[in-house]
Image: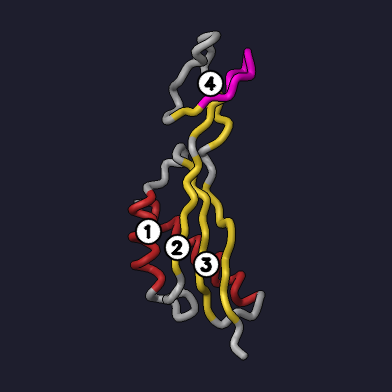
């Protein structure tokens, strides 16, 4: 499962952000995950729950995930349409669509608290 390695990277980013902002604990981590990213949301949540217990700074944090729909853009007519996989053709001109959104995976925000 590559979701474990993805989550290890997310938690490393969160820990570095907490340390550089003098946070004593993290409350939440928000991710943006596109439906075309190849990331299994449930496996990602499982990895978060399993890995967060190893880090006192993160162990009480929650994970929020904003899922982005896939979008394809026709290179010929410029039409943008919802897509659910990579192999789609434009309904108007039968050209292969280019991915225009929904393939992202990134940390949107991290919230936490300082002591005192």
Q: Are marks 2 and 1 in contact (CB under 8 Å)?
A: yes
State the residue at coordinates (55%, 72%).
15
- In contact (CB < 8 Å): disc 3 and disc 4: no
For the residues labelled 3 and 1, the Cα–Cα distance comes to 16 Å
Say whether residue 74 is magenta: yes
Instruction: Mark 1: give few (<14), some (14-19) or many (20+) Cα within 10 Å.
Output: some
CA gap, disc 3 and disc 2: 14 Å
Residue indicated by mark 1: 45
Mark 2 crowdedness (10 Å alpha carbons): few <14, some 14-19, many ≥20:
some
Quadrant in the picture for residue 46: bottom left
**Disc number placed over residue 12 in the picture, else none:** 3
Query: What count of labels does the image hold?
Result: 4
Q: Whole-percent x and y of residue 34?
A: 49, 42
Upstream in sequence: badge 2 or badge 1: 1
Query: In 3D space, how far apart are the residues under numbered discs 1 and 4 (Cα atoms)?
Result: 31 Å
Circle 1: element type: helix
Is the residue under label 2 in contact with that under label 4 (CB below 8 Å)?
Answer: no
Q: Is residue 13 covered in magenta?
A: no
Q: CA distance from mark 2 to mark 1?
A: 7 Å
Asked if 17 appears above or below 6 in the picture, the reply is below
At 60% across and 79% down in the image, what residue appears?
23
* Circle 3/circle 1 CB separation < 8 Å: no
Which of pointers 3 and 4 lies earlier in the amino acid sequence? 3
The vertical placement of 87 against 5, above or below, is: above
The magenta-colored residue range is 73-81
Kind of element beneath mark 2: strand
The part of the image, by quadrant, that contains residue 101 is: top right
- Which residue corresponds to mark 2? 63
Tag 4 residue: 97
């Amino acid at each position: 499962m590559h979701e474990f390695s993805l989550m290890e990277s997310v938690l490393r980013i969160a820990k570095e952000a907490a340390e550089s902002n003098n946070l004593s604990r993290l409350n939440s981590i928000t991710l943006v995950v596109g439906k075309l990213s190849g990331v299994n949301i449930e496996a990602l949540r499982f990895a978060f729950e399993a890995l967060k217990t190893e880090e006192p700074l993160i162990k009480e944090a929650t994970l929020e995930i904003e899922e982005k729909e896939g979008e394809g853009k026709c290179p010929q007519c410029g039409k943008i349409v919802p897509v659910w996989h990579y192999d789609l053709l434009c309904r108007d001109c039968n050209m292969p669509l280019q991915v225009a959104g929904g393939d992202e995976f990134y940390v949107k925000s991290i919230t936490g608290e300082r002591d005192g």
